[in-house]
Image: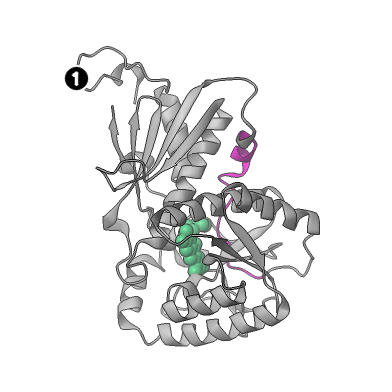
């Protein structure tokens, strides 16, 4: 949008007294839409009010079968909001965030307040360089260990957003494996779930959803990777996967809509830091989509915190393509 189109809402035609220029809004919202979201539904909308960016939930893009409470959607929204803060920092804006800020408009999930540009560039800006490199990698991992120092950096990233990572020991990972086996089998019998998956997963995609190429190979034995295709349309190669990858459960102390957005902020910070060290990540969230198995995972991490994401982390043995995105204008509502 050219700068002369930035008019005040009363239509007076003069340039808006926004801190943000049109180019900056483009950079911020382009960063936002590169966030992860379940099945790549991109369940967000954006409004810009002067120096304030609102991230709203797009209820039409919340998955009714796999995400009836909108938990996963809010995690995606948190991730998108984090990307806005990263891009703002790269541009020199300090920012502050409020979650569920407007009692009169419950659809506003996150509100980001940007300060005037300053130097030096705020520290978060250093993550901007990896924002487009981050993607979900479902292929096999190399057996290289991850240095403890890096694992601590990921812990710090989660804690900076009020969440926590719990690294599973071999006994807990083996228990998780059994839970995954039982849920994977159950999901193949769930017609509603399979119908919903068909809407979003497989074949070629140009705007949203997960195209077949991004699903990764098929493991030749049960592995710690989610087969999002749920058994349909499978022409993928079968390859050997690692036996026990590093697995971290991202948790929050609370369990409500705000905690879910917070989990998304923490998730994206962890993923961007991981990407900056060339680590690949994917998710095993199927066990968190069912109440009974989610409670089992809660038990595996000590019974106090709420598991929000299960992350498999390691060095990739292969490459997989990125998923598409809708143009940011498609989810941009207003410029006030
Ligand atoms: C809340 C949430 C849950 C997700 N659950 C899974 C999952 O269980 N398995 C998986 O392979 N990917 C999962 N994903 C990853 C999405 O499929 C992925 O982010 C989306 O397709 C966009 O692709 P990208 O991450 O490569 O940009 C999840 C993402 C989010 C935000």
Q: Quadrant of residue 61?
A: bottom left
User: Mark 1 packing: few (<14 Cα in 10 Å), some, or many (20+)?
Assistant: few
Could you tell me how many numbered marks the image carries? 1
> What residue sits 50% from the left and 87% below the top?
182
Residue 186 spot, x, y in % from top left = 42, 86
Residue bounds of the magenta highlight: 125-140
Q: Is residue 205 visible?
A: no
Q: Which residue is farthest top?
A: 14
Residue 183 spot, x, y in % from top left = 47, 83
Secondary structure predominantly adopted by residues drawn in magenta:
loop
- Residue 135 magenta-highlighted: yes
Q: Is residue 107 above or below residue 199?
A: above
- Residue 255 magenta-highlighted: no
> What residue sits 65% from the left and 22% below the top?
120
Instruction: Answer left or right for 198 relative to 95.
Output: left
Query: Toward the viewer: 251 or 239?
Result: 251
Q: Is residue 306 visible?
A: yes
Query: Toward the viewer: 309 or 220?
Result: 309
Q: SS for tag 1? A: loop
Query: Toward the viewer: 194 or 10?
Result: 10
Query: Toward the viewer: 249 or 31?
Result: 249
Q: How is the image coloured?
A: one colour
> What residue sits 54% from the left and 28% below the top?
94
Residue 189 spot, x, y in % from top left = 37, 87
Q: Is residue 193 above or below residue 263?
A: below
Residue 220 spot, x, y in % from top left = 62, 84
> What residue sits 29% from the left and 48% below the top?
107
Q: Which residue is mark 1?
A: 10
């Amino acid at each position: 949008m050219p700068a002369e189109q930035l008019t005040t809402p009363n239509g007076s035609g003069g340039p808006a007294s926004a801190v943000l220029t049109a180019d900056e809004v483009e950079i911020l919202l382009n960063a936002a839409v590169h966030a992860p979201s379940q099945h790549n539904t991109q369940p967000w909308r954006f409004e810009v009010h002067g120096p304030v960016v609102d991230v709203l939930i797009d209820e039409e893009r919340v998955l009714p079968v796999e995400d009836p409470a909108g938990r996963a959607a809010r995690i995606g929204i948190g991730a998108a909001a984090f990307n806005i803060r990263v891009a703002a920092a790269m541009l020199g804006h300090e920012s502050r965030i409020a979650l569920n800020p407007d009692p009169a408009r419950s659809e506003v999930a996150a509100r980001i307040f940007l300060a005037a540009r300053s130097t030096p560039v705020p520290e978060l800006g250093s993550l901007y360089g990896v924002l487009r490199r981050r993607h979900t990698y479902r292929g096999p991992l190399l057996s290289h260990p991850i240095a403890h120092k890096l694992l601590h950096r990921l812990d710090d990233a989660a804690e900076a957003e009020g969440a926590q990572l719990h690294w599973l020991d071999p006994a807990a990972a083996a228990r998780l494996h059994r839970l995954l086996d039982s849920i994977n089998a159950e999901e193949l019998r769930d017609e509603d779930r399979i119908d919903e998956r068909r809407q979003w997963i497989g074949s070629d995609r140009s705007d949203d959803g997960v195209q077949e190429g991004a699903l990764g190979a098929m493991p030749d034995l049960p592995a710690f990777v989610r087969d999002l295709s749920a058994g349909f349309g499978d022409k993928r190669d079968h390859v050997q996967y690692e036996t026990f990858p590093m697995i971290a459960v991202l948790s929050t102390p609370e369990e409500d809509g705000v905690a879910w957005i917070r989990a998304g902020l923490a998730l994206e910070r962890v993923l961007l830091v991981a990407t900056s060290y060339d680590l690949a990540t994917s998710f095993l969230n199927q066990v968190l989509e069912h109440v009974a198995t989610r409670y089992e995972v809660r038990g595996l991490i000590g019974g106090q915190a709420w598991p929000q994401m299960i992350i498999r982390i390691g060095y990739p043995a292969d490459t997989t393509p990125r998923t598409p995105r809708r143009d940011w204008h498609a989810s941009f509502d207003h410029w006030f």
